Image (cartoon, rainbow, N blue to C red):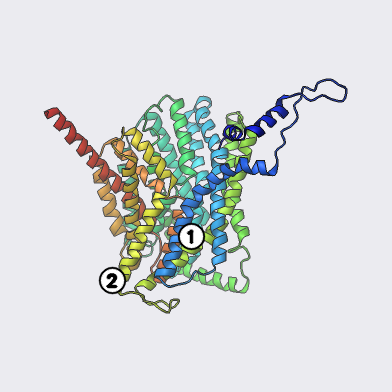
């Protein structure tokens, strides 16, 4: 509710405020004082003013978090006959996630986004294109650190069995900073390429083909090496977690601002395409890092070092591990460098200033506080409930030590129930993503109603649900990720060839809106918990399948719409 609407609703109070504000008060000397008296706002009036404002922002996160958490808990209690462990801790963690995300998103919109808009509009006017591209590349690393979902990857490194996946364990535990930097470098390279594409007006199709060739070659190389095979799930999942609520809007606002300043931002599709490249380049970067690590250290050395570290921690426990303090430190470390870099560009390079400095500072503080709260909630809320449910999911079809009633169903029935559970979870989680609703409205407008919002939303949600179900089946049945991913990407390339540029842009970018800050940690935690329960090598790979399947779904729907439109036009011409 806006302030004007509020005072219109409360006319008497509005009159009193207006009178106090506008009517001069006599001073003791008898002369009129030109300075109005301050508005008196009571706590109840402040609550009425701020209530709708805060309620709307909290409800957005409640709608995304609560249904998913409730679905997992009810399934665990009613279907798997397993009680919720540490319920109070989970409740506090979920509250921290909801409040933290609401605060972070508000800070992002008020504090970080104005930086992107101002810098994007002014950077090409005051510096050369070479400097612009360097700044965008560095920014790619900064926004990657600030992504809430990146913290989920780092948080689950300790759950990997070093004897089964030594290189995966090594990268997630001892090369964590390198991993985030290399993923950020991939995002930065994608942002640079996306900006050049904005300015030059390049087609997305050849860029997709060129990016996929080295990705597939390195994937095949890692797949043929038994020690590197376990890294594929992490690499392809990294492509999904980078396109979150920080990267996409900030890089897009910067790129589109530069395109507008260059006079090339008039196309209605100028904002599409960068998300695709920001998904593919990090995959390539992580594969390169894994191969580099394999040349530096052997699996035997990794295992022996891990055993030595375990002995040290048994004698001298790490006080920083699994404590809220370290989560807060990580939250500050994620946001603060990005903020400092944006300030350096704005104040030092552009010699500019912010129009609303106090509001922007307020937004930046909210971003840091929100990220810290979200990190704590991720560890004790989302990650905990996902890991808990995932670890007891196999009780539906196999015997587990933690579940005295397992197996609850026959093997076939249990498998069907678990895969069906994953399908419904993916469908509901995707429809709850606010970014998908916004994308649906945009696409409906750009296609003049030919591709309806509901068609896009259900296509994407259906694709994600199939992808998550495939990922769960991969963990349970143990088939190779590459044997599924490569054929799916080959199908996506074929559909891309036959699709129009309009649907290619939308289709490949649709994967980015499915990997939000709620879905990613929940799916990752559930996959890792399930992987440990069924003794899988690793629990990664679900997100990568959840990203490619909606691309195929949207491109297929686009081709169907193209065929339907062409048929209708032909029929009209014949008549």
Circle 2 SS class:
helix
**Residue 193 location in percent, x, y?**
40, 37
Looking at the picture, does residue 38 appear above or below residue 78?
Answer: above
Task: Pick whichever, 159 or 134, lies toward us.
Answer: 159
**Cα distance, mark 2 to mark 1?**
35 Å
**Residues at marks 2 and 1 touching, judged by CB atoms closer than 8 Å:** no
- Residue 192, quarter of picture: top left
Residue 440 shows up from this direction = yes
Task: Pick whichever, 230 or 420, lies toward us.
Answer: 420
As drawn, which residue projects farthest toward the top? 31
Left or right of 490 on screen, residue 158? right
Circle 1 SS class:
helix
Residue at image coords 36%, 76%: 407
Instruction: Nearest to the eye among marks 2 and 1: give it.
Output: 2
- Residue 225, quarter of picture: bottom left
As drawn, which residue projects farthest toward the right? 29
Where is mark 2, residue-wise?
Answer: 412
Task: Pick whichever, 340 or 530, lies toward us.
Answer: 530
Residue 213 shows up from this direction = no
Task: Pick whichever, 286 or 247, lies toward us.
Answer: 247
Where is mark 1, residue-wise?
Answer: 172
Looking at the picture, does residue 42 appear above or below residue 65?
Answer: above
Left or right of 566 on screen, residue 482? right
């Amino acid at each position: 509710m806006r302030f004007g609407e509020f005072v219109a609703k409360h006319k008497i109070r509005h009159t009193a405020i207006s009178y106090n504000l506008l009517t001069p008060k006599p001073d003791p000397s008898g002369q009129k004082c030109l300075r109005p008296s301050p508005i008196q706002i009571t706590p109840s009036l402040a609550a009425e003013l701020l209530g709708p404002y805060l309620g709307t922002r909290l409800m957005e996160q409640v709608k995304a978090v609560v249904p998913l958490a409730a679905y997992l808990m009810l399934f665990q209690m009613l279907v798997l006959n397993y009680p919720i462990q540490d319920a109070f801790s989970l409740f506090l963690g979920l509250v921290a996630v909801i409040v933290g995300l609401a605060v972070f998103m508000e800070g992002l919109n008020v504090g970080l986004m104005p930086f992107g808009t101002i810098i994007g509009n002014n950077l090409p006017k005051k510096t050369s294109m070479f400097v612009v591209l360097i700044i965008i590349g560095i920014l790619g690393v900064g926004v990657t650190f600030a992504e809430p979902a990146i913290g989920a990857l780092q948080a689950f490194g300790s759950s990997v069995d070093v004897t089964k996946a030594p290189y995966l364990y090594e990268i997630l535990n001892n090369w964590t900073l390198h991993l985030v930097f290399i993923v950020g470098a991939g995002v930065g390279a994608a942002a640079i390429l996306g900006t050049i594409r904005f300015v030059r007006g390049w087609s997305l199709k050849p860029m997709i083909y060129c990016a996929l060739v080295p990705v597939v070659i390195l994937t095949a190389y890692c797949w043929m090496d038994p020690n590197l095979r376990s890294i594929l799930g992490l690499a392809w999942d990294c492509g999904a977690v980078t396109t979150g609520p920080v990267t996409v809007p900030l890089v897009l606002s910067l790129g589109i601002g530069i395109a507008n300043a260059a006079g090339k931002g008039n196309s209605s599709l100028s904002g599409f395409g960068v998300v695709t490249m920001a998904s593919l380049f990090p995959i390539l970067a992580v594969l390169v890092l894994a191969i580099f690590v394999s040349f530096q250290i052997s699996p035997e050395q990794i295992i022996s070092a891990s055993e030595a570290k375990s002995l040290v921690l048994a004698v001298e426990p790490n006080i920083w591990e699994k404590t809220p303090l370290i989560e807060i430190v990580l939250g500050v470390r994620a946001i603060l460098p990005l903020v400092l870099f944006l300030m350096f560009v704005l104040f030092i390079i552009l010699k500019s200033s912010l129009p609303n400095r106090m509001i922007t500072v307020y937004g930046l503080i909210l971003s840091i506080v929100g990220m810290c709260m979200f990190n704590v909630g991720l560890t004790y809320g989302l990650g905990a409930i996902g890991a808990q449910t995932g670890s007891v999911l196999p009780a539906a079809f196999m015997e587990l030590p933690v579940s005295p009633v397992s197996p609850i169903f026959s093997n076939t029935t249990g498998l069907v129930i678990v895969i069906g559970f994953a399908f419904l979870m993916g469908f509901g989680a995707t429809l709850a993503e606010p970014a998908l609703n916004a994308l649906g409205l945009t696409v409906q407008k750009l296609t003049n109603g030919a591709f309806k919002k509901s068609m896009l939303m259900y296509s994407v949600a259906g694709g994600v649900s199939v992808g998550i179900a495939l990922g769960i089946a991969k963990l349970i049945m143990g088939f190779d990720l590459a044997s599924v991913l490569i054929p799916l990407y080959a199908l996506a390339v074929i559909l891309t060839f036959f699709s129009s540029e309009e649907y290619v842009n939308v289709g490949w970018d649709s994967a980015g809106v499915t990997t939000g800050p709620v879905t990613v940690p929940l799916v990752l935690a559930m996959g890792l918990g399930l992987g440990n329960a069924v003794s899988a090598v690793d629990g990664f790979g679900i997100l990568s399948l959840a990203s490619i399947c909606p691309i195929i779904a949207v491109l297929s729907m686009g081709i169907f719409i193209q065929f339907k439109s062409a048929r209708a036009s032909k029929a009209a011409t014949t008549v």
